[in-house]
Amino acid sequence: MDTDSQIKILEAQIRECFGRVVWTHKTQEKCTDIISKRHSNVKYTQIGLSALTTTGVLITVFGENNAIGITTAILSAILFAINTYVKGHDLGEIAQKHSDSASDLWNVREEYFSLLTDIKAGIIDLEELTEKRDSLQNKLSSIYKGCPRTINKAYKKATKALKLNEELTLSDQEINMFLPDELKKNINA
C-alpha cells in the first residue's frame, strides 16, 4: 500500500476520534451547566427552608399556633433530607470535575483539529502522523479515566448544541470579525 493511501486511512481514523472528542467535550460542558444549576437550586432551597423553619420556630415559641408548628416540623424534615443528600453528594465538586474534564478535552480536540489540518496541508509524514495519533490516544485515555460520568440530559443538550445550534460552527464572516484585515478571507469573491 502506498503512503498516500496509508495517510488517508489514518486521516479517517483521526477524523472519527476528533468527532468523538467534540461530542464528549460538549457533553461535559453541558453536564457542568446542569449540575451547577442543580447545586445552586439546592443551596437556595436550603437557605429558604432554613429561613422558614427559623421563622416558624420563633412564631411557635412566642405564640400559640399549632398549624405553624406542624408546618415548621415538616419544613425541618424536608431540610434535613436535603442536607443528608447534599452531605453525600458535593454537587459543586462534581460540577468542577466536569468543567476540568471539558477543559482537558478542549485541548485534545484542538490538537486533533491541528493534526487534521497538517494532513490536509500535506506537511506531516506517515511516521510523525502515527506518533501524534498514538500520543493523542494516550492523552485521551488518561483524561477519560478522570472524567466523571455524564448524564443523558447533558448528552441531549450537547446534541442540540452541536446539531441544531451549530455551537462549534462559524461562518467566514464571523471569523473575519475576530481577525485583522491582513488575515481576513475575502467572502465576496
Image: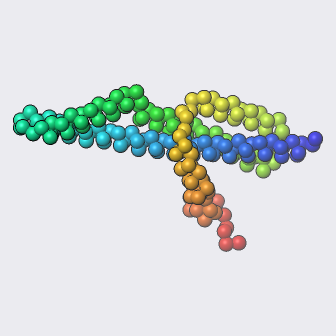
As displayed, is residue 11 above or below residue 174? above
Q: Position of residue 7 (x, y in %)?
A: 84, 43
Residue at x-position 35% and y-position 39%: 42
Residues 86 and 178: in front is 86
Instruction: Using the rendered view, name the quadrant where residue 18 is placed.
Output: top right
Q: Is residue 173 left or right of residue 54?
A: right
Q: Quadrant of the C terminus?
A: bottom right
Instruction: Using the rendered view, name the quadrant where residue 2 is placed.
Output: top right
Q: Position of residue 37 (x, y in %)?
A: 41, 44
Instruction: Using the rendered view, name the quadrant where residue 10 is placed.
Output: top right
Q: Quadrant of the N terminus?
A: top right
As drawn, the residue found furthest toward the left would be 63
Is residue 41 visible in the rendered structure shown here? yes
Q: Position of residue 151 (x, y in %)?
A: 53, 40
Q: Position of residue 169 (x, y in %)?
A: 61, 57
Residue at x-position 81% and y-position 48%: 122
Residues 186 and 101: in front is 101
As displayed, is residue 155 above or below residue 142? below
Residues 108 and 147: in front is 147
Residue at x-position 64% and y-position 42%: 21
Is residue 180 visible in the rendered structure shown here? no
Q: How many marks?
A: 0
